[in-house]
Image (spheres, rainbow, N blue to C red):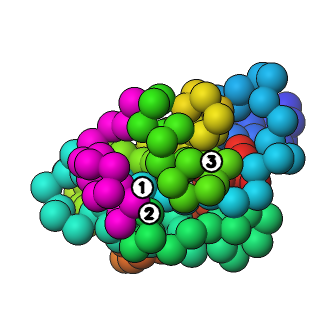
Amino acid sequence: MTGDRARLATRHSWCVLVLIICAGCAGGAATSYLHPTVDFSHIHRCAVVPYQNLTQDNFADERLQSAFLSEVLHDGSITMLDPEETESAMRGLKIAEGSPLAPEQFVALGKALNVEGIFFGTVEEYGVSRNTRRPVYEVTATFGLAETETGNLIWRSQVHADGSSFWKKIFGGESASLYDVSRKAVRKALGSLL
């Protein structure tokens, strides 16, 4: 009888361990929206406007936008304009950088740049988490895409990523770099679009 109990306890311990590992490995998915009636196949050429920055890091918006642009270019399915060209057109149209754009501004900017879509973003958290014992980098951001014919939002994704992992939480270790966490956040977001 005691042998059966020992085997049952061992089996129970293994089941609990597998559940813990699975829970630790499951990364937080992006919360995303895709417009249900938009045909994304006609969007080939896009621009990206300067991101909004809600963090204390004065360069978080530029760093995350750079990571975003690199990932979209790496994918290769969309041609992206140089951000300087976009910023120049925004100045010409008197559109303030780093603030939300209205639908009519997306339309005007789309005509000026000859693009089908305009990406935008907001950086909400960027830096060291204050909720952990060890320093862990984290990024929370929202990314979006407006089509330029009507200025309507056709894609939006909010993500959170951090530099920890299940194994680092159990055995210790340094956080992934802020650069790597930024790329992880961008990839999570773009996974629902590209």
| The one of 147 and 64 positioned closer to us in this rendering | 147
Give the quarter of the figure containing the C terminus. Answer: bottom right
Q: CA distance from mark 1 to mark 2?
A: 7 Å
Residue underneath mark 2: 86
Please identify the dominant SS of the magenta region: loop
Q: Are marks 1 and 2 in contact (CB under 8 Å)?
A: yes
- Say which label, 1 or 3, has the lower sequence index: 1
Q: Is residue 108 left or right of residue 102?
A: right
| The one of 24 and 140 positioned closer to us in this rendering | 140
Residue underneath mark 1: 49
Q: Is residue 62 left or right of residue 164?
A: left
Q: CA distance from mark 1 to mark 3?
A: 11 Å
Q: Is residue 136 left or right of residue 29?
A: left
| 143 over 32 or under it: above or below | below
| 63 over 166 or under it: above or below | below
Residue underneath mark 3: 117
